[in-house]
Image: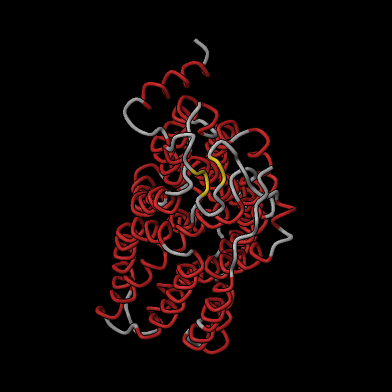
């Protein structure tokens, strides 16, 4: 029996019991988890061992990492177009294979050039392409329930934050940092390739189903009231001609930049304000737990209330994170900040998955999401720079943190004027 026939047979069997989109959501969450080898929270564990063996300073490694992240960002629009052209399943299969190969190559790094290439490959395959493909395919299966679905998918990322750092540390202690990357590559193949090949369906319409489990008479897009059988959406060229694209992208750029800066310097900020590293480490799991609890609620809110109001509120939470960390001086204030920052992480991750499909439709979501994600990743690569400058200039992070908090507040007002562009039926 051909692989395509097996997939169709599985869809028919599963669809007798529940909507097949939930299977796609599970694979999307699995992909988010499997992106861990290319995420900052996993790399952070390897900085010390890599620097010690290769004779590189933390600044050199961080510079290579930031430059590699920036370079990988510019490749994402091309990957988005390839997802639109060849389908998410085909591209996810290739991405999964290349992600494993990138892990193997990274473990063999011998110097700064090879290390930078390895960083770029892992960031592009995992944090960029794999996450974008997961967002794309789940966006195809959910429209009216998209916010809730995307929030559940994002729990895979939260699980990666909880599992990959301690797993990586255990592997380093057990087999060394190089062999650790071989194991991470094999694990990536083991958890991704078979589910993608046998279970991924690019669009519900490909197997006679409708988004959200609707019947053909139900609405495909409650915002535009299109029939469910019509897959609509703007091309990237059309999206770039709308004010909505620039408002959404500016908001996502800001969130990505500022969240990354707080992640990167959290321990340093706490230390600069008189706390020890143990208290800083206690804040991370509390933020992750808060993120897990809040993400489904944020998704439900996005499905129920006007998006621009929720977007504005998310930017206010971002400003609150920047301000609240300046008040951290003991364990209670650190834990209060950790809760606020956890809510902030939940909002950012859900917005990242939700915004572009919601405003620009499903038809060309790969190329639109790829371009939007490129902008967000550029923000992430630049994020630590202002706080680094502040520490070198003022000897303190507080002036820059308070200054940066003004930007999301202004942006929160701007996004209130965000309006969805008109999407033609054909």
Q: Nearer the viewer, residue 253 or 112?
A: 253
Quadrant of the rendered image containing residue 350: bottom left
Quadrant of the rendered image containing residue 305: bottom left
- Residue at left offset 68%, top offset 36%: 85
Q: In the picture shown, does residue 187 fall above or below 341?
A: above
Would residue 178 be seen by someone viewing this image from the given angle? yes
Q: In the visual, does 304 lie left or right of 253? A: left
On the image, the x and y values in percent for residue 138 come to 48, 42
- Residue at left offset 25%, top offset 78%: 331
Q: Nearer the viewer, residue 175 or 94?
A: 94
Q: Nearer the viewer, residue 246 or 379?
A: 246
On the image, the x and y values in percent for residue 56 come to 56, 61
Q: In the visual, does 330 lie left or right of 161? A: left
Task: Specify the quadrant that holds the C terminus.
Answer: top right
Q: How many marks?
A: 0
Seen as rendered, the residue at the extreme top is 1
Would residue 109 be seen by someone viewing this image from the given angle? no
On the image, the x and y values in percent for residue 416 come to 54, 74
On the image, the x and y values in percent for residue 183 come to 43, 37
Display colour scheme: secondary structure
Seen as rendered, the residue at the extreme left is 332
Q: In the picture shown, does residue 403 fall above or below 92?
A: below
Quadrant of the rendered image containing residue 22: top left
Seen as rendered, the residue at the extreme front is 217
């Amino acid at each position: 029996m051909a692989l395509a026939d097996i997939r169709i047979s599985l869809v028919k069997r599963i669809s007798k019991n529940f909507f097949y989109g939930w299977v796609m959501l599970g694979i999307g969450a699995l992909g988010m988890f499997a992106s861990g080898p290319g995420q900052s929270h996993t790399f952070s564990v390897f900085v010390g061992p890599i620097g010690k063996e290769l004779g590189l300073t933390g600044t050199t490694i961080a510079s290579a990492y930031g430059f590699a992240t920036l370079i990988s960002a510019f490749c994402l629009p091309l990957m988005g177009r390839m997802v639109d052209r060849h389908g998410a399943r085909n591209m996810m299969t290739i991405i999964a294979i290349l992600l494993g190969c990138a892990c193997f190559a990274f473990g063999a790094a011998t110097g700064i050039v090879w290390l930078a290439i390895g960083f770029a490959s892992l960031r592009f395959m995992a944090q960029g392409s794999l996450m974008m493909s997961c967002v794309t395919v789940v966006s195809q299966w959910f429209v009216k329930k998209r916010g809730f679905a995307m929030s559940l998918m994002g729990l895979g990322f939260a699980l990666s934050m909880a599992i990959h750092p301690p797993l990586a540390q255990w592997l380093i202690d057990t087999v060394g940092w190089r062999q650790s990357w071989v194991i991470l590559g094999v694990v990536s193949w083991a958890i991704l390739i078979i589910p993608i090949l046998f279970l991924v369906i690019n669009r519900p319409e490909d197997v006679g189903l409708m988004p959200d489990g609707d019947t053909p008479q139900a609405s495909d897009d409650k915002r535009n009231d299109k029939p469910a059988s019509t897959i609509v959406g703007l091309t990237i060229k059309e999206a770039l001609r709308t004010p909505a694209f620039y408002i959404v992208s500016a908001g996502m750029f800001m969130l990505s930049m500022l969240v990354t800066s707080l992640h990167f310097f959290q321990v340093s900020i706490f230390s600069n304000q008189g706390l020890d590293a143990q208290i800083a480490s206690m804040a991370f799991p509390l933020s992750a737990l808060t993120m897990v609890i809040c993400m489904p609620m944020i998704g439900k809110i996005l499905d129920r209330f006007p998006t621009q109001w929720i977007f504005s509120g998310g930017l206010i939470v971002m400003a609150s994170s920047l301000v609240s960390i300046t008040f951290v001086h003991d364990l209670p204030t650190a834990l209060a900040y950790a809760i606020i920052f956890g809510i902030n992480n939940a909002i950012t991750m859900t917005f990242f998955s939700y915004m572009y499909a919601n405003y620009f439709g499903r038809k060309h979501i790969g190329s639109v999401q790829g371009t939007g994600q490129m902008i967000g990743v550029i923000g992430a690569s630049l994020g630590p720079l202002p706080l680094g400058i502040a520490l070198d200039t003022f000897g303190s992070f507080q002036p820059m943190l308070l200054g940066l908090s003004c930007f999301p507040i202004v942006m929160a007002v701007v996004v209130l004027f965000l309006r969805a562009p008109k999407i033609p039926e054909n």
